[in-house]
Image: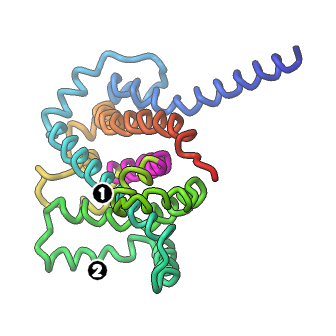
Amino acid sequence: MAFKIKKSVLYLLLGFLALICLLPFLLMIVNATRSGNDIMTSFSLLPGSSLPSNWKIVTDNLEIGRGFMNSLIIAILSTLLMSYFSALTAYGFAFYKFKGRNIIFTVMLIFMMIPSQLGMLGFYDLMTKMRLIDNYIPLIVPSIASPATVFFLRQYLLSVMPKSILEAPRIDGAGEFYIFHRIVLPIMAPGIATMAIGGFIGSWNSYLMPLILLNNSKKWTLPVMVASLGSVKDIASNIGATYVTVAISAVPIMIAFCFFSKYIISGISAGSVKE
């Protein structure tokens, strides 16, 4: 009886914490339906009636659909590149012995500690010389080199996959890429999904680099468009319209998180291979 009471209290506490976590999202959605004056002068958890007017202000001043697609293309491609090449690199560091492996891995760890903002000026200068300004390539291709993802996946792979599992296919004459794609990748799937969530969110929310590299407003990502709202008179005086754009920008993140979270939970048992 006492155990059931403790379990019920625990569930109530977890439910309360979940509500607290969801409260900012609820306020974001509610404020998207209220006028700027109502938001500034009162607090409410009930939807208002200003969503059509807020949406009209956004669509009249911003190409919100174009910005959404621009961000989606960059985020998906960069996440795919980061996940695949980081998994491939982590597999090499984990199960291959080659000259200079420890030195290369140490250098990679050092790069993890350097803030990316320090190299921004040099990166911009390089992209200018390569004539890649106002292009999506600098926002997508560099995701291939992700030291933090490689480090995490290497540690994950060492913890879930014994080296002996690779011996049987090698004896049967299987190639290394075949082994990687058919055996290693499925085992790494939960770890890859975990890092893909962070990679997708980071790419989707990226603001500074797209702002520096993209000059054409038609190529702007959604965060850059949201930041430009202050220069639009109608939107600057209507905070509700700003909440509409923020709510739209949060939808893909929530969808990606829900999808990958389920994938992680379902793949943990399959990924936990023990010797």
Query: How many C-alpha atoms fall within 10 Å of the one at disc 2: few (<14), some, or many (≥20)?
Result: few
* Residue at image coords 24%, 74%: 124
Q: Which residues are magenta?
A: 187-204
Discs 2, 1 touching: Cβ within 8 Å: no
Query: How many C-alpha atoms fall within 10 Å of the one at disc 1: few (<14), some, or many (≥20)?
Result: some
> Which mark, by number, is residue 122?
2
Q: Main secondary structure of the magenta part?
A: helix
| 273 vs 24: above or below | below
- Three-letter residue code for mark 1: Leu
Q: Is residue 130 left or right of residue 184?
A: left
The residue tagged with tag 1: helix, strand or loop? helix
Mark 2 or mark 1: which comes first in sequence?
1
The reply to whether the magenta stretch includes residue 155 is no
Task: Count numbered badges in the picture.
Answer: 2
> Which mark, by number, is residue 81?
1
Q: How is the image coloured?
A: rainbow
Q: Is residue 250 left or right of residue 1?
A: left
| 233 vs 85: above or below | above
